[in-house]
Every structure is written in C-alpha cells, then in structure tokens.
Amino acid sequence: MHFQLPYSGLQWSDVPFVLLGIWHTLLLTVLAVAFGTVLGILVGWLRESSVLARVGLAPLVNVARSIPLIIQFILVNSFFALAGFAISPLLVGVIVLSLYMGMLTSELVRSGLQSVRPQLKKASRSLGLGYWQELFHISGPLAFRAVFPGWIGTVIGLTKDTALVSVVGYVELLRASQILINRSNEALLVLAGTGLFYFVICYPISRYSRRLEKVLQHD
C-alpha cells in the first residue's frame, strides 16, 4: 500500500520564511566578504613581502583552495563538536567562507603587488619615499586596479557558494527553497524564484564593477 505525502501548495504565509532565507544569505555573504577581504589583504601582503611568510602560509592557501567547500564545512563543524564547543551554523559558515575568501584574495593581492614594476618602486625610493609611503601611494593603488576585477569575480562566486552552508544546518535561501519544495511540490516555481534572486544580487555587482573598472582605468 502506497501513501502519498500531502502537498499544501505555496501560500502567502511562506513569504516571511523566504525573506528570512534571503536575509541569512545576505548576512553570511557580507560577513564572509568583509572578514575574508581583510584577511586576504594581510596574507597577500605578507606572502609578497616575506619569504618566510610565503613558505609558511602556502599550505593554508593550498588547502583552502583545493578542498571542496562542502567538505570544509563538515570538517570545521565536526572539529568544534568534538572539541566540545557548540557554535551556530552561521559561525561555521562565516569561518569557512572567510578563510576561503581570504586565501583567494591573498593570491590576487600577491599577484597584484608583483605586477608593479620594480622601476617604479626604485624611483619612489630615490624621491625619498619610505616603504609604507611607497606602498600606500604607488604599489597599493596600482595593485588595486589589477586585482579589482578578480576580486569582484570572487565575491560573486562566494555569494553562490553560501548555498553550501545548508549542509551544517544553516537555513539560507536555497535551503529554505528546498523546504518549500518538499512541502508544496512546486519545484519549478520555487527554483526559478531562487535563481532570480541570485541573479538580482550578482548581476548588478558585475555591472557596477565594470563601470568602476573603467573609471579606475581612466584615472
């Protein structure tokens, strides 16, 4: 004898649940991008300015870039559970995505600093500029122009990667959509709306970054 689960269809009462999933996605994205960018700038600068830091931090960069994110979420969540620390799924997501964003950004920063011609650095020193003055006024701005497009691409990718945090119980937009699909059996409509949301978030970022990139090129 077969039993069919009752489907209730989509209802207006589902809207707050979807909005909560959207808020969770945006919150996780903003936190991970902010912490990850600061971490990436610091690590990238250290790896460019110090051979010891380049060698010492290389394993962390390689691990974060090579292991699939879904495995990183599970490992970090399991580590804290075994250590006896009960942390929220949001914190697990912020830790993993910030490290991931940081390591990707660090490589962009390192390559951006390396792209600055040595002649410019020598010329600034001959004009009496110190290391930090040269970094903030010459190498930094030039590296930013080179790094910016790649950083925007990393932000867009991270926004979509937030969907993977559901593996540790975080109810972001995609997880909320899956719950609605299981209850309403409206997979096509729900997934279309979810995809539209990601498009509405990511496409304007991409368009604005192109305009800003043109402005930077003409400065």
Image: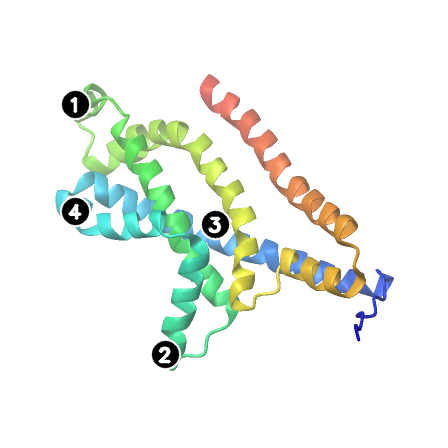
Q: Is residue 112 left or right of residue 193?
A: left
Residue 28: give x, y in percent of width and height. 54, 57
Which circle, 4 or 1, is nearer the viewer?
A: 4
Q: Distance between the residues labelled 1 and 2?
A: 52 Å
Residue 55 numbered mark, or none: 4
Where is the C terminus found, in terms of image quarters?
top left
Task: Using a 10 Å C-alpha cutoff, classify the residue at mark 2 as few (fewer than 14 neighbours), some (14 to 19) or many (20 or more).
Answer: few
Q: Distance between the residues labelled 4 and 3?
A: 25 Å
Residue under circle 2? 82
What is the three-letter code of the residue carrying label 3?
Val
Residue under circle 1? 122
**Can you tell which quarter of the image residue 147 is in?**
top left
Where is the N terminus found, in terms of image quarters?
bottom right
Task: Using a 10 Å C-alpha cutoff, classify the residue at mark 3 as few (fewer than 14 neighbours), some (14 to 19) or many (20 or more).
Answer: many
Say whether marks 1 and 3 touch (CB < 8 Å). Answer: no
What is the three-letter code of the residue carrying label 2?
Leu
Residue under circle 3? 33
Q: Distance between the residues labelled 4 and 1?
A: 26 Å
Sequence-wise, the earlier of marks 2 and 4 is 4
Residue 189: give x, y in percent of width and height. 79, 49
Sequence-wise, the earlier of marks 1 and 2 is 2
Helix, strand or loop at disc 2? helix
Sequence-wise, the earlier of marks 4 and 1 is 4
Residue 51 numbered mark, or none: none
